[in-house]
Image (cartoon, helix red, strand yellow):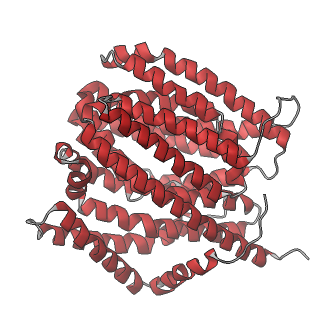
Amino acid sequence: MDPGPAAQSDVLKARSIKSGAITLTDQAFSYGVQLAATIILARLLTPVDYGIVAMVTAITGFMNLFRELGLSSATIQSHEITNNQLSALFWVNVGLGGLITLCIAALGPVLAWFYHKPQLSLVTVGISLTSLFSSLGTQHGALLTRQMRFGALAVVRVSALVAGSGAAIVVALTGGTYWALVASSVVTALWSTCGLWIASGFRPGRPRKGVGIRPLVRFGAHIAGFDIVNYFHRNLDNVLIGRAWGAQQLGLYSKAYALLMFPITNLRAPLHRVAFPALSRLQNDPGQFRLYFVKYCSLLAFISMPFVAFLFACSEDVIRLLLGPNWVAAAELFSILALVAFVQPVIGLTGTVLVTLGQGGRYFRLGLFTAIITVISFFIGLPWGARGVAIGYCLATYIRLHPALMYAFHKTPIRPSDFYRSIAKPCLASFVMGLVAVIVRGRLTAASEAVVLALLFPLSALIYLGVFALLPGGRRTLADYWKYPSLIWRRTGHSD
């Protein structure tokens, strides 16, 4: 006898929590590797080195979106998919990857002229290789995600980061300057693809016609359209700052943003990798879909918001400790961008809802609206340098919040009120915690950065949990989270 909806929901919940535990562990190891590499490389390289590579990656990353073309999302979201379809999608990705590699390499002289940096020609050629290497593993990674085989993905991801970081440090120690960052990208992409082939077991056959990939490509095209406009507005700030204010300000801005989003991404990414296939399986069950979304949104806010509030309160200490005194000018930018990062992870769930429900067209239009508002804010803030761009980005993020919710959730099982209720307790508790942390930090003027962070982190965590527990329903929510570890060890069914 097939299990009923309630039993299926319990199985999916237990499986999601177990998968989440695996991906969080994966992310913790990845975070440790990346953090160690960041600390070491920040002392071996200069802001100008990071600025030079950022000038290239702002453009090459955009072109790489055409390589992926949203086909990995199509593979994960599709209700059923055949081996012939996977093979066809693989060859589409590889063909696009080869073409994009050639296009990026050809752009080298153009970027060198645009930024007045001759060294960009060869740097661009080096980074272009990541497009081809990554395209060879796109469908293998999507297949592992679809099957929720997050243990295998974790091994591949961590080992690739170790290999790439190791290569970067070796090159930097031998005086390779910005080539260390190029080596990191190339080695990470190649190692990751090799690992995905081994882990997935998928071996593509020769391409065939008439295997039914047209709907998948159409859906993927909408995802790619969103990714393109999203990448454009997420990276135009780097292009504008680099062009108008030079490598020094761009290096400070890009490193402040990257350092801030580094822990946030490492918290959000594992949850999203689990929630995306899980919500896709619930797309035909509105009630369970809404329930899963509310729990996911609440958990994401519970984890990310207090962490960002703590980083905001201790911005200068974090910059000095992790990057060193040469980067202290990035502290103000770090604080401003923290206001963006406070809501950015949960705002991103608007897109998750649309993609898992198969509404690719609306997803693309949402991205277009977001891009227009954000790009306008960049141009308004540009005359005031990186600081003006950061402030403009912050204001645009909050201005577009409610309109984006209204549009994204229209005619879906989710309502904007579900979103606001989900984040209310974490938001309020994080605000109180951040305020106390700022006051206490102001009294620790004589302490070193390491001492300040060591004292404030546990204190902030206790304040956050205490305030959260005092809010209506807070204790019940904490009790539910406390039960999650027991579900990690529960045996769950496995299906593709």
The picture quadrant where one finds residue 289 is: bottom right
For this view, does 478 lie left or right of residue 78?
left
For this view, does 264 lie left or right of residue 65?
left
User: Among all residues in the image, which is located at the extreme right?
Assistant: 1
Residue at horizontal 21 percent and vertical 49 percent from the top: 332
Q: Count of labels shown?
A: 0
The picture quadrant where one finds residue 154 is: bottom right
Q: Position of residue 83 (x, y in %)?
A: 83, 42
For this view, does 392 lie left or right of residue 56?
left
Residue at horizontal 43 percent and vertical 55 percent from the top: 31
The residue closer to the viewer here, 27 or 483, is 27
The residue closer to the viewer here, 472 or 323, is 323
The residue closer to the viewer here, 44 or 438, is 44
For residue 410, say whether it is visible: no
The residue closer to the viewer here, 353 or 75, is 75
Q: Position of residue 26 (x, y in %)?
A: 53, 58
The picture quadrant where one finds residue 327 is: top left
Q: Position of residue 30 (x, y in %)?
A: 47, 54
For residue 104, say whether it is visible: yes
Q: Position of residue 128 (x, y in %)?
A: 51, 25
Q: Is residue 197 above or below residue 262?
A: above
Q: Locate the C terminus and report the quarter of the image it occupies.
A: bottom right
Q: Is residue 471 above or below residue 268?
A: below
Q: Locate the N terminus and report the quarter of the image it occupies.
A: bottom right
Residue at horizontal 84 percent and vertical 76 percent from the top: 3
